[in-house]
Image (cartoon, coloured by chain):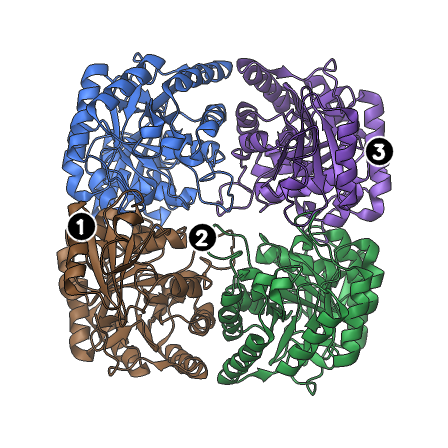
Chain colours: A green, B purple, C blue, D brown
Amino acid sequence: MLILMQTDHTKKQLKDVLAKVKALKLKPHVIPGKLNVAVGITGNSGALDPHLFDAMPGVREAVRVSKSYKLAGRDFQHHDTIVPVGPFGIGGPGLIVIAGPCAVETEEQMLRIARRVKAAGAQMLRGGAFKPRTSPYAFQGLGKKGLQLLALAKKETGLPIVTEILDQRTLADVAEFADVLQVGARNMQNFALLKELGQLKKPVMLKRGLSATLDEWLMSAEYLLSEGNKNIFLCERGIRAFSDHARNTLDLNVVPAVKELSHLPIIVDPSHATGVRARVAPMARAAVAAGAHGVMIEVHDRPDQALCDGPQALHPDDFATLMIDLAAIAGALGRGMATPALKGRG
Amino acid sequence: MLILMQTDHTKKQLKDVLAKVKALKLKPHVIPGKLNVAVGITGNSGALDPHLFDAMPGVREAVRVSKSYKLAGRDFQHHDTIVPVGPFGIGGPGLIVIAGPCAVETEEQMLRIARRVKAAGAQMLRGGAFKPRTSPYAFQGLGKKGLQLLALAKKETGLPIVTEILDQRTLADVAEFADVLQVGARNMQNFALLKELGQLKKPVMLKRGLSATLDEWLMSAEYLLSEGNKNIFLCERGIRAFSDHARNTLDLNVVPAVKELSHLPIIVDPSHATGVRARVAPMARAAVAAGAHGVMIEVHDRPDQALCDGPQALHPDDFATLMIDLAAIAGALGRGMATPALKGRG
Amino acid sequence: MLILMQTDHTKKQLKDVLAKVKALKLKPHVIPGKLNVAVGITGNSGALDPHLFDAMPGVREAVRVSKSYKLAGRDFQHHDTIVPVGPFGIGGPGLIVIAGPCAVETEEQMLRIARRVKAAGAQMLRGGAFKPRTSPYAFQGLGKKGLQLLALAKKETGLPIVTEILDQRTLADVAEFADVLQVGARNMQNFALLKELGQLKKPVMLKRGLSATLDEWLMSAEYLLSEGNKNIFLCERGIRAFSDHARNTLDLNVVPAVKELSHLPIIVDPSHATGVRARVAPMARAAVAAGAHGVMIEVHDRPDQALCDGPQALHPDDFATLMIDLAAIAGALGRGMATPALKGRG
Amino acid sequence: MLILMQTDHTKKQLKDVLAKVKALKLKPHVIPGKLNVAVGITGNSGALDPHLFDAMPGVREAVRVSKSYKLAGRDFQHHDTIVPVGPFGIGGPGLIVIAGPCAVETEEQMLRIARRVKAAGAQMLRGGAFKPRTSPYAFQGLGKKGLQLLALAKKETGLPIVTEILDQRTLADVAEFADVLQVGARNMQNFALLKELGQLKKPVMLKRGLSATLDEWLMSAEYLLSEGNKNIFLCERGIRAFSDHARNTLDLNVVPAVKELSHLPIIVDPSHATGVRARVAPMARAAVAAGAHGVMIEVHDRPDQALCDGPQALHPDDFATLMIDLAAIAGALGRGMATPALKGRG
């Protein structure tokens, strides 16, 4: 349920509406807009009767929200969310590029690669300290030591850190070091983890599950939003289809769909989607042309020695070339790379 | 790597092999068989050289295991695993039927339904105390109170309890009350949870993820097995395909495939797969005819009032009819219902 | 649009309704039932107004049919269609088994296999004379010569012939020799071919396309029905999903769905679905347990020499064992094998 | 099998190779290149022994082609195929845009829209005279009359005509009027139709089937190529996946994959893939950024009155805006719009 207040409503009228929502044991969310104030209601399991509210003074209309998500939807918030990360905002016209290795391996490796991606223009640094691996026998990441190496790389380059969280037990550690906590595709519906992340205020990047519909994805964002964390952005990383010519099927169709239905920013990860170095650049270019707010690219200067996903990592030189192409496409469409001047609003 | 010992090897020879494995910083797993003893090796990230072992005294052959899973595979253990649950064994010729409501709602509801499914011949009772829900606004289960109601129902009927675990924080509570801990489809690759469950000795039912390949599913079982828990069985519950005539596409093809490649038992959940009451019985019958070791069926005597998934719940009368059909099909194929006489071997 | 006549309507009233339909340049289809007569209307591109008919004398109700198919739906015809093929009817309680090699190869091969499948109890013989092959370099079938060999096998065994049609140019030839014309998965939406087959009166077996929804499948049946051919039955043969443990994913869920929504018979082809001999029998048993009206099984006595799909062909001995299992399952569910006594009604 | 001739081979040596191929009852295909001549061999059902050829004078190497396709692969032809259509070549650096209505409706409609798309810069005109429709009751196209209207539009605008062929019986008619014959997704494996089209010399646009793997798609191209028609280009139009946020899932990943494995040009149809007007432009832009040789866009000036697929048609004004964006993206990547100066080589 969404209650749209009249343009000239009084503070008293709004207060009465909020009181009534609380009397129903439900939770009101005031959403101030340029012209209108709206009140979102959550906590009801079934549909609410609009007549409970639409005759109240100051109320223009009470609208049943047919989508199962509320806080994540455009009906709830018309304007785009911009998630502030360091000096940058994700979700505005400026393109964000997150780059770095799949996994943190050594201090030297992280620093070398961090310098290269910064030099090429990336605004944020990625690197996995805790790695979700299909096999229990595969490299599981350096753990807390990896977090410390990310901190070193941040200290030297100034790049904010994006790293994955996959265990409730290590949440506090990861949250201490990360600027953005990444929820991987396999944990998109790990609701216990989502609830804990929703209680943080740190930005969360929510990857789409391999077989998640758009509705399910936004419902997982809703878990984060309904716990109070508004700094959420989405990341498309390929879905599972029958195709065998790529590791996953990057679903760029979802980019305009997300932008239509939700106010949350959306970026694209072509590295995990394709799994093949030669296809990363074409798909990164396509993501920007389709309107994504950013891309996340795996970069490694010694991919043959990488402990994880070497075959999909771009060499820093190729990454620098890609950055130029992305800037050119963004420019052709009236956009540009995000700059520190563009501050997020929270 | 799998080391097959000669039939007449000595204890000393086996001990030497184990010592060499440990010297390589790897983990040996002795697998005693009727005729042969084998030693599985885990912990290696890449392939091992068979020549490291095949010239040692008492060793018949050292075999590279091409599958990514080891402990879950038939190469590692030829005979079928039988998981003991109360007086029953899951994985033998006797058919196991787990039945009960989607969610624990009230004491009366649980007791009424538990009595009915026991009367119809079910050997185990299901009921969700913690519910994974796509929406944060949907009923999330009674929590610990639900576990206590399950204990009551067990006390009265003697039926072992199958219930879902979805949060590392509540693992100890659930493990205290459950005879089988169910890992749901959405958590099939929640590796942090799997590792903790692997350290328990309690039986775990691992549901297949919506878009999991057979290999990925067995790799998740491998997470449990490699931590030391051998009481694992699998549950097919439908995959995500393009079809719109059922909620999910129950993939019965996987039943003979699992039985060929793995020694782990496999049961089928037609209730979640179809999502529609009228299709549960045909698919349950088909599962038994395809060779599943058991089925899990949702039953509710007042489905219109169910707090969760009412439309797919069978009425107890229809469940009783289904039990008769399942017994008849099992009989036609030379099998029967599992009886308490059939004890698992662990 | 479907017009339900009153139980006591007069011939004159029915005639008036038919005249009005024709005056609207639409096509009426009278469907006589035990208690009711209904008139289906086809030829309208958009929705018709029920008020055009429901005030006419003798009309009980005019119903908008929301499904896109009409003639294929249960709303149009409540009772099950039974397709007569030789002395058998497909669609009744008696189970139909169609068996034979993938492709007609030689006279000896056809006669040997035909004798074996007849001896085991199959009621119809399959064999491809024209083969649809993914590769232009693969064996394309014996063509017309293959049809003549099928005729020889029919003459000797009496088994009706099921064979594939895949070219409008050879339709007359195939129709001359076939008792059932098979439309393969790849041609399910070859509408030009469907229209020509609809104008024949011969039975058509319409296989489901690899990625066809149930609705699309029934719409293709509608192409056949709307041209006047009522002797149509469906065949599920596996869909394309992400799974890699079977060639295709046999979707048995569709069996109860078809039986609920349509009056057309449905059989199952586990051979093409699984592509692997060892999985054919479990899936055939499951198909019968799920309620299919029949199964189609590939059988070859020298599978290693087969020119097409040898790996999925059952040996005649294994086929005979399977027949016994299928009869046992059918018996357990109150059905039996179809016998010549059961004549179709056309 | 592919035979690579030495750079300095003699005519006689080549002739001997061709003679030997024919003596084996196989078909040789000479492929002249800038530096090398190669001879492709087709007609063999199994693998050929390279030793049959590699000791012959003038032969550098005989290579087994592991891919199931041969003529469609890069191994067979290194350089890009450029398909000549009117004064344009499809497959070169210049971007090709095919635009027009889904279906030919009236003379006025075709002329109005043809003028608009030409004015905006489209190089070719599309329009369906024969329409493949899921429902037999939907508008099936104007048929031969539609072809004549396309001819009128071509006469006035000079735009070459792209139109669909879906019936062997109307092939001669369509071939008379079309500059490019389009094979729709549903007919991608209608092998009878493909064989007849392969015997024409007219350009064929082969759309990808809804569930076709890349290998199957190229094998269908192989049907056309092996009959002698080399003027083939491919069109990606969305695959069937589980997603429900778009009609189909446009698989742009296939663009770089096709360009890597095949020499055939590939264009993209975002209109059918998305089914929604607002998503056509983002996906068209993405297709160009991903490296497609062209796009095909549905345009209608009165979409609400369109007889077919109105909701996905762009208004001519929006199409003109899109053309500017596409040119800008092409420019940013060092390409441009195809111009008449760029002639195909056939």
Amino acid marked by disc 2: Arg
Per the image, the residue denoted by label 3 is B177
Label 3 Cα crowd, 10 Å radius (few <14 / some 14-19 / many 20+): many
**Residues marked 2 and 3, same chain:** no
In this rendering, does residue A241 appear at all? yes
Marker disc for residue D162:
none
How far separated are the C-alphas under marks 2 and 1? 45 Å
Q: Quadrant of the C terminus of chain D?
A: bottom left
Please tell me in which quadrant of the rendered image residue D341 appears.
bottom left
Image location of residue A1, percent across then percent down: 68, 60
Label 1 Cα crowd, 10 Å radius (few <14 / some 14-19 / many 20+): some
Assign a secondary structure to mark 2. Answer: loop
Marker disc for residue D240:
2
Image location of residue D43, percent across then percent down: 23, 47
Marker disc for residue D20:
1
Disc 2, disc 1: CB below 8 Å? no
- Residue found 36% across the figure and 31% down from its top: C310
How far separated are the C-alphas under marks 3 and 1? 78 Å
Image location of residue B276, percent across then percent down: 57, 36
Amino acid marked by disc 3: Phe
How far separated are the C-alphas under marks 2 and 3? 44 Å
